[in-house]
Image (cartoon, coloured by chain):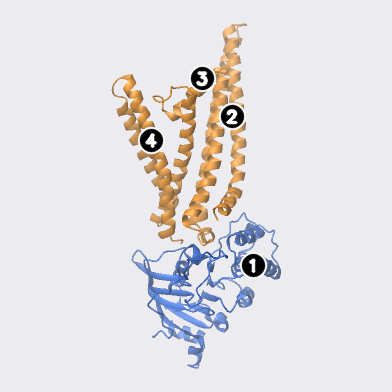
Chain colours: A blue, B orange
Amino acid sequence: MDSVVSAPSVPPQPAPAAAPQPQPQPQPRAAAPVLWCQNLTKAYGPAVALDRFTVSVPAGRVVGLLGPNGSGKTTLLKIVAGVSHPTAGEVRVAGLPVGPDSKALVSYLPERPYFSRSMRVREMLAYFADFYPDFDTALAHEMLGRLGVDPTSVCASLSKGTVEKVQLTLVMARHAALYLLDEPIGGVDPAARDYILSTIIRAYRPQSTIILSTHLVRDVETVLDDFILLRYGQMLLHAPVAYVREKGTTLDAFFREEFRC
Amino acid sequence: MLGKLMTYELRALWKPAIIMVAIMVAAGMIGAGCLGATQALGEVARSGNGILAAPMAGNATAVLFMAALFCGFLVGAAVAAFYVFVAMRFYRTLFTDEGYLTLTLPVRAGTLVMAKFWVAYLLLVALALGALLMYTLMVLAVSGGDVDAVAGMLSIMGGWGAFVADGDVASALGGIVNTLVTCAYALGLAFCSLTLGAWWARRHKVAAAVGVYLAVGWAIALVFSIAGVLAMAGDVVSWNVALTVVSLVQTLANIGVAAGGLALSAHLLRTKIDLS
């Protein structure tokens, strides 16, 4: 299957850093794609999780990273977030190689809880506010209020579902250039799923890009602009959702057809 | 960012540090009291007043001496327990699920490692110096307030007797300096071993890290032990100088292990470590 959205082969360059910036937060280069990968490969011994993955994602899109279990979705997001390292290939975030500057632009929600169990929710808010200049504490408090979470709660006392929602709150309360959400609606009940999706939509800003990995395609279909199909670490298709709709089908039906066992 | 990271490290570590200091001070004071009491009982036994006084004093002395030994062990164990806690926190915050929070911060890997090192080092040094103080109290108690005995004890840790007279103040200061270097060595080696274990091992990463730690630590200790034995060939004057040189080289090696371990740890974090 062809890739409908092609990736440039020349790596995007970051903004020149000759003059000192008054704002310490690294700024994405307007022209650079927010995510650019070229022949990105990740192997764990003989197993190849990502195989020469190439993609270019422009700013201002909500992109679904779709594929069955083991297709390389989490691996890709980990590499972009900087918690895993590629075996080969290149990756740039807003023209920047993965590092402290790119991490300042990326808001990453991993699929597992990362809270220290002894910390209180308000301490986590302070932690994010301390390290991320783009963190909106007022917005985070407002989101927690809607969720009914007491900021003085100790993380260990929260249920698994609430921890996931608090984590999502922290991630979405940042004004980041790129949001990486790894299975944000996996393993939660339908009501929580609705809350999570509405939180994502509400927090979305037009200049930001969201990459959302999931295999629950039906639930996210309405919020996506584009989708990337992955299988065995290779990209099958990167296209707008409209591309599927023009074929007279839904993304969910398209996904099921493509990955029929 | 280094300051912020250090603040969070300090918030996480000060409570266990205070607990260990409390245990250490209590054990040190009790130990010194027990040793002081053995001295007093020794006087009673030597005076020979009464038929039963001497054997009773002898038995009590043995009990008190054992209690003092246990207190001395507790003082050292408090330092060791804090060291283990620091190593566990290093591993937990970087290589388990908490790593997703730590490693996505917009800071350099070197800054992360150095923040953890400096806070752990300052607290460990405070504990180590506290332990030396407690041992000093115990030595003073058992020696009847002989300051030279304390200087002698401290100078053993430096081992630089050829440059400064054994048991002298300078020699004692050398012992304290060597203790500070040993703290840096121990932390650098632990951080590096944990990072190597997290990188190499697919499973049982902590066990792998302990293996690396013991292997490297023992190898270094063995090399300098052999060097020390070889240095003792020849006459008294020459072996004293040779031993001092070996001690100095070991001190420099410890500094090298600490710096190299931290640098390797930061490098692996930046380029190799994958969170599972």
Q: Residues at badges 1 and 2 in contact (C-beta under 8 Å)? A: no
> Which label sits on residue B91?
none
Q: What residue is disc 3 on?
A: B148
Query: What is the chain identity of the residue bearing mark 2?
Result: B
Q: Residue furthest left?
A: B234
Q: Which residue is mark 2?
A: B28
Q: Residue at point 50% right, 82% down?
A: A226
Which chain's residue wears label 1? A
For the residue marked with disc 2, what is the amino acid? Gly
Q: Is residue B36 above or below residue A139?
A: above
Q: Are marks 2 and 4 on the same chain?
A: yes
Residue contact at pointers 4 and 3, CB within 8 angstroms: no
B175 up-or-down from A229: above or below: above
Q: How far apart in space, not on screen, are marks 2 and 3 (Cα)? A: 20 Å
Mark 3, Cα crowd under 10 Å, few <14 / some 14-19 / many 20+, is some
Circle 1: is it few (<14), some (14-19), or many (20+) Cα within 10 Å? some
Residue displayed at 55% across by 61% down: A114
Q: Chain of mark 3?
A: B
* Whole-number angstrom distance, CA of label 2 to CA of label 4: 29 Å
Mark 4 on the same chain as mark 1: no
Tell me the CA gap for discs 4 and 3.
26 Å
The location of residue A245, given as percent across then percent down, is 51, 90
Residue B153 is situated, as x and y percent measured from the top left of the image, at 48, 25
User: How far apart are labels 3 and 1 at the CA level?
Assistant: 62 Å
Which residue was labeled with disc 4? B250
Q: Closer to the N terminus: mark 2 or mark 4?
A: 2
Q: Which residue is mark 1?
A: A136
